[in-house]
Amino acid sequence: MPLITCQNLTMAYDKRIAVQNVSFVVNPGDYLFVIGENGAGKSTLMKGILGLMKPVSGHIEYNGIAQKQIGYLPQQTMVQKDFPASVQEVVLSGCLNSTGLLPFYTAGNKAQAAAALAKLGIASLQKRCYRDLSGGQQQRVLLARALCATSKLLVLDEPVAGLDPIATTEMYSIIQQLNQSGITVLMISHDIHSAVTYGNKILQLSGHEVFFGSTAQYLQTQPGHRMMEGHPL
Amino acid sequence: MIAFLRQVFAYPFMVRALVVGGIVALCAALLGVTLVLKRYSMIGDGLSHVGFGTLSIAMALQMVFPAFANIHSPLLLSLPIVVVAAVLLLRLSANSSIKGDAAIAIVSSSALAIGIIAASLTAGMNIDVMNFLFGSILSITGTDVVLSCLVAVLVLGLYIVFFNKIFAITFDENFAKATGTNAGTYNTLLAVLTALVIVVGMRIMGAMLISCLIIFPAITSMRIFKSFKAVVVCSAGVSLFCFFTGMLLSFGIPTLPSGATIVVVNLAVFLVFSAMGLLLRHRAKP
């Protein structure tokens, strides 16, 4: 039973169609890369899945997961660059989807936050200020927050954008470990080579669906060849 | 000092001003942290100008149509209009082709202009208009005291109950929305509360100076503190300290206007905190 099923999905910004007629499924345990150039509709599709935008047509079906139980790692915003917040506060805010109208966090929430930090190897940062951290550390903190929101599916929006090569490699290896521990991953990326290396499935967009299938199949296809040649190793 | 304070509290108008002003300073500081961090600082400024416009129109109406003179306080007329303006400004800066700061500037200067025209056509630029612009502690009535207590209960209560949610929508609105927090509702709530605080506060601080109470304490606290909760608590403290210091200074030296003095005290504390922040950072680096 797939976690998420998208059928003939069309999304639009102010009546301008961003991406149309996309159909794909996300199965439990998948590591799906959504690739495509800027403006291909990757982010718009993701907003549809997260419920931040309504589709124009087609529909999305969730099985065994509520929309608000998706762990989302957004791209960093300008607001966050100089935001006075402790790592603890940021990570705990991932638990809000389970607190309901309760005005405070429970001991369970705090344990969950501490566990998420430990899992990502940043337990020592708990008391630090978010804005004083390096880019790679900030990204891990936001990933820890996403882990507090979900136990099943992570949606990552270009998680290595702006990271240095070492931090990029570390980030990919952390995400791979999370995937191997049973969490489904949907990652938006420009990086075709990482997609081929780490992912088991690929969805390529270009305003419409170019390819959806396994990584092995992708390498046999025309778009696969072209993408790989366009970015020689 | 005690004799001085006893003298201050001997005047009923001073007691009223201290109660209303203290409440406004506290609430404005709490809301200000979120507004500043969300890059909505100028909403406070825009709303105060709308407040000035509506107060001038209310006064003009009272002069032209004696029937309106029965309205107990012109505040009752400006309150709903400013609340509507707050919601509109928020919507405007979120999703229109005119971007946030420009939208606020347009609304703000237009409201100011309309207010000045309304005042000039009827009473002329008299002392009342000056009071609306720069504040006057003498104009605080019993209605203002009741209104400000209601606002205080509302703002403090909602701020405490929704503290974690307010943090979430301030830090990362998209994440909050994606995980089921209704960011739109909380944004509207913040805008409405800000409008209430501004309408009540502009009588003391004046339309020109009220945004100081929203922006300064938050910016000051951020020089030193590094967690959201610490910044909020410190802002509340800084705001109250600056307000009471400014009020007592202007009482002690009668030529000092109260609103402007409070702003200058805020500026001084900001400079002190900035220097301390620089020192701390310097020391942290080996």
Image (cartoon, coloured by chain):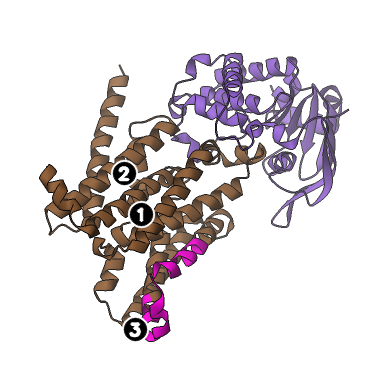
Q: Earlier in the sequence, mark 3 or mark 1?
A: 3
**On what subunit does the disc labeled 1 rest?**
B
User: How many numbered discs, if any?
Assistant: 3
Contact (Cβ within 8 Å) of mark 3 with mark 1: no
Image location of residue A233, percent across then percent down: 69, 21
What hue represents chain B? brown
- Secondary structure at badge 2 equals helix
Q: Is mark 3 on a helix, strand or loop?
A: helix
Residue at 64% x, 36% y is: A100
Three-letter code for the amino acid on which mark 2 is drawn: Ser
Q: Which of B259 and A23 is in front in this view?
A: B259
Which residue is at 52% across, 39% downward?
A: B161
Residue named by callout 1: B211
**Percent of width and height locating residue B126:** 25, 76
Q: Choose between B222 and B213: the one closer to the eye.
A: B213
Tag 1: Cα neighbours inside 10 Å, few (<14), some, or many (≥20)? many
Q: Which of marks 1 and 2 is in front?
A: 2
Q: Mark 3 vs mark 2: same chain?
A: yes
The vertical placement of B152 against B56, above or below, is above
> Magenta stretch containing residue A57, yes or no?
no
Query: Measuring 55% from the left and 41% from the top, which residue is drawn there?
Result: B169
In the rendered image, residue A222, in percent from the top left (x then y), is placed at: 84, 32
Residue drawn at x 58%, y 59% is: B96
Magenta part mainly helix, strand or loop? Answer: helix
Q: Which one is in front in this view, the residue at disc 3 or the one at disc 2? A: 2
Magenta-tinted stretch: B59-85
Q: The purple chain is which one?
A: A
Q: To which residue does mark 3 refer?
A: B121
